[in-house]
Image (tube, rainbow, N blue to C red):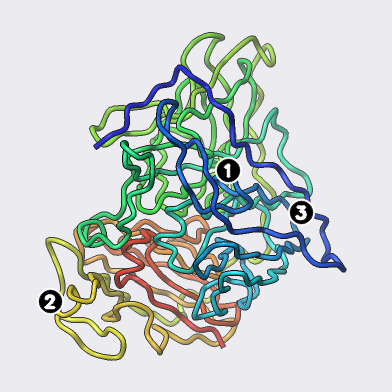
Amino acid sequence: MTLMMSRRAVCAGLLAAPLIRPGRAAASAPAPLTARTASVQLAPPGYGMTKVWSYDGSLPGPVLRAAQGGRLSRRLVNELAVPTSVHWHGIRIDNAMDGVAGLTQEAVPPGGSFDYDFALPDAGTYWYHAHTNSMEQVARGLSGALIVEEATPPDVDADEILMLDDWLIDPDSAQFYADFTAPMMRSHAGRMGNLIGVNGRFDHRLKAGQNARLRLRLINAANARIFVLRLQGMEGWTVALDGMPLASPEPLVEEIILAPAQRVDLIVDVTAEAGTPAGLLYAADDDSWQALVELEVSGRASGARRSAPQPLPPNPRMQIGGLEEATRREMRMEGGAMRGMASGRFEGQQMDFQELIQRGQFWALAGQVGRGADPFARYRLGETARITFVNDTVFPHAMHLHGMHFRQLSEGAAGPMRDTLLVMPQQSAEIAFVADNPGKWLLHCHMLGHAASGMTNWIEVV
Ligand SMILES: [Cu+2]
């Protein structure tokens, strides 16, 4: 089922209002961030409005901006009819502020509020989203961008946030398909949308002149979709992944693969001449390349391209020492359609796959189905940890660690620092991180239907 898309008409925008927060805690009550219902024109003109769950009435929620080294302070006000909480994805955060209902805080009941207030050690592109029944709440719209600004930002003509998402909408009613527990989706690749868009719009557009230099901050906010992307009429570099700067900008020569929850910061130059096609393309389900963001090129920003960009300034604590002495553990990923598993531990009991399916569970991480009473591992504060994900399923999974960034180890070399790693079917991937943030941290698949049906575990740093 697909929605007919029309790019002709441009309807009223739902632009997220930038919000500048001072770099220190306010003495008075923090500014509210209100979770509430709203109606937005998500589908193309001709379709009705869609009822969404929003932050502050917009989809995505407002862009939150703050300076590196400062604090973010927001009062979540819950005007929804269900409990909720906010996770600040990728922030190396105080554990009490991590927003995981049932692990780091109690969910905020309808009519309740919760004050989030935390330090921002790292500059970069982050995002925030619901972490109570996140499978449904994120799909209904509860997410937004969180930008932590460098003291000296790179020299660009424009800094654009591109929040990629997809929505599963009934074309007759323009409302979300409300079966969020559909076993077919949970046991396969997850809830895929039939409407794809950026910043809450199916026809998000940019404008620039030839030779303009843009910083593009891509955020994959989709429940399950892995975006495969290509630039058209632009050339450039990857400068950061999951918020963390690369040691040196990497020329963009291949497709960009962005798994759910991952971010990539690009610095690109517009090479297209005025009036020629440009923008960001994505690989559609039928393998054709489709426009995701159209860039309208008019005039020239300058007579020639600039020289290659400098790396972004590094964030603190990006070194991972002690790899040889590190504790090594293996996390086997099991279950799902076409493979299944013999058994797993769910709510304290060992169950075979059929029993698990009857309880709506399809996946296991290290034999554990869903978050158990005991963590996958306990680490001493400051120790270096190594975990090998062994994907024994026929689906890719985007593994996300809360509270700390890691590096992937391959053939002895440590890759870029990330918080979410795509582990392909029948493959293994080893990560290493310094357990330098005390508390209880979720380690889960960010295909949210998988997380809700077994692929959620946790670690503890003490
Ligand atoms: Cu998964």
Give the quarter of the image for residue 14: top right
* Image depth: mark 1 or mark 2 in front: 2
Mark 3 burial class by Cα count in 10 Å: few <14, some 14-19, many 20+: many
Residue nearer the viewer, 76 or 122: 76
In the rendering, at what x and y percent does residue 282 appear? Answer: 38, 33
Label at residue 354: 2
What is the C-alpha distance between the residues marked 2 and 3?
51 Å
Label at residue 67: 3
Q: Amino acid at mark 1?
A: Val
* Image depth: mark 1 or mark 3 in front: 3
Mark 1 burial class by Cα count in 10 Å: few <14, some 14-19, many 20+: many
Q: Is residue 149 above or below residue 383?
A: above
Q: Is residue 286 above or below residue 111?
A: above
Question: Which residue is identified by label 1?
Answer: 239
Q: Are marks 1 and 3 in contact (CB under 8 Å)?
A: no
Q: Amino acid at mark 3?
A: Ala
In the rendering, at what x and y percent does residue 386 appear? Answer: 43, 75
Which type of secondary structure does the marked residue at label 2 adopt? helix
Q: Are marks 1 and 2 in contact (CB under 8 Å)?
A: no
Q: Is residue 246 left or right of residue 159?
A: left
